[in-house]
Amino acid sequence: MFSFPLPFHPGRLLALAVLLAAGEARAQETAAASLSLNEVLARVSERSPTLAAQSHGERAAEALIEQAGVRPNPTLDIGVENVLGTGRVQGVRSSETTVQASQTFERGGKRDKRIALAGRERDAAVREFAVHRAEILTTAARAYVAAVAAQERVLLAAESPRLARETLAVIENHVKVGAVSPVELARARAALAAAQAELARAEAGLASARGALAATWGGTPNEVPPLAGTLRVPDTLPAQESFRSLLTAHPRLNWQAAVVASRRASLALEQSQAASDVTASGGVRFLREGSDAAFVAGVSVPLPVRNKNQGNIRATRETLAAAEQTSRAIESDLRAVFTAAWQDLTAAHAAAKTLRRDALPATEEAHQVVRRAYEAGSTPLTDVLDAQRALLAIRREILSAEADYAAALVRVEALTQPAFLATTALLSSR
């Protein structure tokens, strides 16, 4: 059975409902005003000036495919002979005019190989853009994690002045009754001033981090609302092999594979250049001021006696071998970078879990014990200030370890999953 301490009025229930609705609306507005990692990545993809500039490379490569398929232009030759001579060929009475058209026919499949090479270079341009896009998104994810850490440092720094004010209020009461020396009041005020200075430094760091984040999409710090993410390491590490297995799909490897294919297509084109092209010509020759005419025709073929394009072929073979070796070097480099990133991830996870599980509860308990002892007059103020500093130091260490974990996770995903799904899940966890 329920009872009301005050007389029940329907108007009060309505007012209570309005207040609850207003609170829920404010909470929804706050959530809507926050900026998530997914929203940042979308902004970067759509608005990054760097990506916009690099996107022209693919369109340029498309134009080169069109140009590669163009056949050689025909040539029109007009020649006049036996003019402005002496004797019988004086003036233009004995002139002969030849109008002739010629066309070069490519041999060795040069046109098809040019088109194939242009297509491979277009593929390389597309995959190069994917590499640059992944790098820029990685920069944005790192900046977001750094900004979230800076945001939480501000919240942590704001705790120090609060504790300092509580201590100051206790000391002021003790000074009024003559229980402690005014010297302790001065110490408490100095501690409060130091805490406020630390908060100002944290706020400046947050402003800088917001500016760096906005720069990733070409924006300004005013475009960065409070960030939605929070830093809290999970209870267990994710499966390492689930990330390692994705290394073979890294954009750099895909780009290098396209470069190797392009070098092979270039070698095929250089080899086709050794085949001599045939130029066929035909026309009409007008004799003696146009009174007579005759057809003329001819075929010309270069004789590949000295130049068989052997130097270009050998050079292209070397660039192909270098590209294939580079692929193996990239694979080795990716494995090494992944191993280092995973070690950092593991170390940060262990540090954060140990500090939060063991060190933080003990430090909080010690702080409470010292405060109660000081209020009872059995311990000096310096012990209280030391306990406060120890508590805040542990919380800063935990935040630093959690920020290191998130940064290492970004590095791991940059190598394996540039969509940053695990980082997004980490920041959205509670």
Image (cartoon, rainbow, N blue to C red):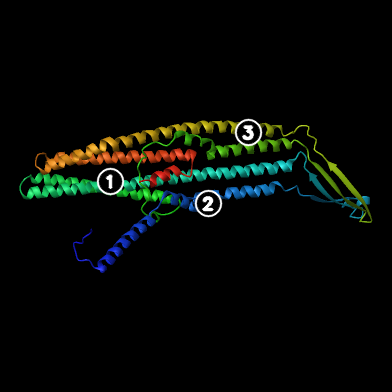
- Is disc 3 placed on a helix, strand or loop? helix
Q: Give the image location of residue 85, x and y in percent.
A: 88, 50
Tell me whether circle 2 and circle 1 mark residues in contact (CB < 8 Å): no
Q: Residue at image x 20%, y 47%? A: 163
* Front-most of residues 139 and 424: 424
The quadrant in which the N terminus is found is bottom left
Identify which amino acid the numbered label 1 is placed on.
Leu
The kind of secondary structure element at disc 2 is helix
Q: Give residue 52's mark.
A: 2
Single out the mark in the foreground, 3 or 1. Answer: 1
Q: Residue at x 75, y 35 (%)?
A: 274
Q: Nearer the viewer, residue 14 or 121?
A: 14
Compared to residue 213, the image places residue 234 above or below, namely above
Give the amino acid type for the residue marked by disc 3 in the picture. Leu
Name the residue located 47 percent from the left edge and 51 percent from the top edge: 42
Q: Is residue 81 left or right of residue 39?
A: right
* Number of callouts: 3
Place of residue 302 in the rendered image (x, y in percent of width and height, measured from the top left): 80, 38
215 or 232: nearer the eye? Answer: 232
Residue 89 in the image: state x and y as whole percent.
Answer: 91, 51
| Position of residue 46 in the picture relative to residue 151 (left or right) | right
- On screen, 50 above or below 351? below
Instruction: Nearest to the eye among marks 2 and 1: give it.
Output: 1
Q: How far from the left and from the top, in percent, is residue 138? A: 46, 43
Residue that mark 3 sits on: 320
Residue at image point 29% right, 36% down: 357
Quarter of the figure with residue 21: bottom left
Q: Identify which residue, 265 or 138, lies in the foreground.
A: 138
User: Tag 2: Cα neighbours inside 10 Å, few (<14), some, or many (≥20)?
Assistant: few
Can you identify the residue that label 1 sits on?
Answer: 156
